[in-house]
Amino acid sequence: MRTPATASTRITAFNSSTPSDCWVYVKSPRPRLWQNTAVRGARRSPSWKGATKLATYVLVHGAWHGGWCWRRVAPALRAKGHEVYTPTLTGLGERSHLLTPQVGLDTHVEDVINVFEYEDLREAVLVGHSYGGLVITGAVASLAHRVSHLVYLDAFVPADGDSLFSLIGGPRPEYLADWKLEPISTFGVTDPEDVAWLKAKMTPHPRKAMSDPVKVARPVESYPFRRTYVLAAGQPMRAFPATAERLRANPAWKVIDLPTGHDMMVTMADELTSILLEAAR
């Protein structure tokens, strides 16, 4: 089927057996980046008659993690036909070689804004886990017109001027040693294979990102999109139950308890996927 020249068409790539790379050229009323992708079939624009509206997700990880931590959630969302981005913040994961003393919270906010800008994202579900809550809060002023739902996963919901250190009561020795938290059970992960996986993947977190204050132009409650907070209620970390209770009293928020530990994308991936699917409806 020939794609109309004026359609804004996004291509989702797969092959039922093995991925194969190809160049996909999409005509649009304005210039777009060429997209290198593997193709199982073209996804129709929701504006076409009879098309099902699909969602776009941007999943932002927390401290010491990377885009890799969504490995059990992102494929499940994509299997439903949704578009999913799992950026790794500068200086972490496969981008750990970019870690310098200058990398801070503003760097990570810009990372997320750039995903939206360069991928031309609209009506996205923006998700932040843990430290990622500071990142998405800092980014939202620039992205309010591109976001349909803001989701915090056992995450900080900061006010203007807050930093990670100020929210946890100042730097603690375990944050200042080698920038890796031990044991992994701190994150509510106890399965031996999962523990080994996290130990192999976690990388030092930029020190500056923990002390930088977040810039919040206005409270997230003042924006027209929806807001959800998911609390890891099974093994709560000290910072988040009070946040969840405060938001539970605010009608602008939906608060959900998951009976698991902090890294819910690892320990309760199926349940979290269901929550994220609901957030797009």
Image (tube, rainbow, N blue to C red):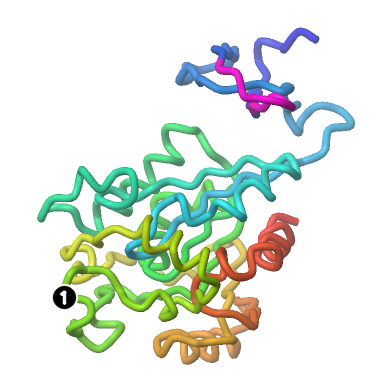
Q: Is residue 8 left or right of residue 277?
A: left
Residue 128, horizontal then vertical, whole percent = 47, 62
For the N terminus, the quadrant is top right
Residue 227's place in the image compared with 240, above or below, is: above
Rendering quarter of residue 255: bottom right
In this rendered view, identify the residue nearer to me: 157 or 143.
Answer: 157
Residue 47, horizontal then vertical, whole percent = 76, 30
Residue 68, horizontal then vertical, whole percent = 46, 50
For the C terminus, the quadrant is bottom right
SS for tag 1?
helix
Density class for disc 1 (Cα within 10 Å; few <14, some 14-19, many ≥20) is few
Q: In this view, does 218 lie to the left or right of 266?
A: left
Residue 193's place in the image compared with 125, above or below, is: below
User: Which range of residues does the magenta coloring cover?
Assistant: 13-21
In this rendered view, identify the residue nearer to me: 135 or 13.
Answer: 13
Main SS category, magenta section: loop
Q: Is residue 16 magenta?
A: yes
Q: Does the magenta stretch include residue 99?
A: no
Residue sitting at 68 percent across and 49 percent down?
77
**Residue designated by label 1:** 176
In this rendered view, identify the residue nearer to me: 263 or 117.
Answer: 263
Residue 274's place in the image compared with 234, above or below, is: above
Residue 140, horizontal then vertical, whole percent = 43, 57
Residue sitting at 60 percent across and 54 percent down?
72
Q: Is residue 281 left or right of residue 237?
A: right
Q: Which residue lies furthest to the right in this view?
A: 50
- What's the amino acid at mark 1? Leu
Residue sitting at 60 percent across and 18 percent down?
20
Q: Which residue lies furthest to the front in this view?
A: 192
Rendering quarter of residue 187: bottom left
Q: Which residue lies furthest to the top in this view?
A: 2
